[in-house]
Amino acid sequence: MEPQLEPPYLIVKPGLTEDDFYRLAGEDSDWEFLDGRIVMHSPASSRHEDLFRFLLTMLSVYLDERKGALVRGSRYPMRLDPNWSPEPDLLIVRDIRRHAVTAQRLEGPADMVIEIVSESDPGLDYREKLPRYREAGIEEIWIVDPFKNEVRVDRKGPAGYATQTLASGRLPSSVVTGFWIEVSWLWQPELPSTMHCLREILGE
């Protein structure tokens, strides 16, 4: 009998090609292609899923109303080069770049990505993904860390990247015009109503 893995876990399989990744990985798999390795995460925790649902709903409904960009959730690869096809928890692409959104993957970097730190390897987003996202020139990067109760934000400007870390307070997006969140919403034991938050954001 094969041993059963208890989450959280992270499985790394090196030595595979980009073609291997796109052949083997399906839309329901928990795999990413990071630096020429297939990385498989354990199932997301309930807290991770709650944060993902909250942010995806907020951005989806906001963009349905205000337009200007589209949002994609996890399981949608962002192909940066033949060795990197990460799958951010959320990625945002402005309308002017919709041609890069294909049925299988995003060709090139998103305009904005959001990563929610996972139990399987809490340092992965900081250690591997963040440097590669900055190298790709992604304009806005959020790392939501429910273990530290803080959001790290990296924004690209004319002089390079500026970083800020927030535990509370209003966090506006530089990519999604007019969108913001109150960071402390994310740390409440029960996340607030998305409709209530959206009415506040939309000024209704």
Image: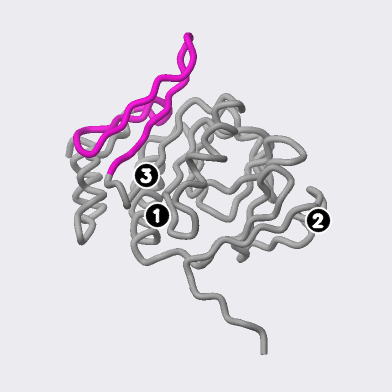
Cα–Cα span, label 1 and label 2: 28 Å
Instruction: Provide the residue designation for mark 1.
Output: 52
Residue in view at x 38 percent, y 24 percent: 163
Q: Amino acid at mark 2?
A: Asp
Q: Image height check: is 124 above or below 154?
A: below
The label number, if any, that marks residue 20 in the structure image: 2
- Which is nearer the N-term, disc 1 or disc 2? 2
Question: Magenta residues, as a range?
Answer: 150-177
- Which is nearer the N-term, disc 3 or disc 1? 1
Badge 3 element: strand
Q: Give how far across and how far down residue 108 sits, in percent.
A: 66, 33
Badge 1 element: helix
| Of the pair 85 and 71, the residue shown nearer to us | 85
Within-10-Å neighbours for mark 2: few <14, some 14–19, many 20+ = few
Q: Magenta residues: mostly which secondary structure?
A: strand
Instruction: Please identify, in this view, whether the residue under mark 1 or under mark 2 is nearer the observer.
Output: 2
Instruction: Provide the residue designation for mark 3.
Output: 144
Cα–Cα span, label 2 and label 3: 30 Å
Within-10-Å neighbours for mark 3: few <14, some 14–19, many 20+ = many
Residue in view at x 74 percent, y 46 percent: 36
The quadrant of the image that shows the C terminus is top left
Can residue 1 be found in the magenta stretch?
Answer: no
Whether pointer 2 and pointer 3 mark residues with C-beta atoms closer than 8 Å, the reply is: no
**Horizontally, is 53 left or right of 26 in the view?**
left
Q: Give how far across and how far down residue 109 sits, in percent.
A: 61, 33
- Which is nearer the N-term, disc 2 or disc 3? 2
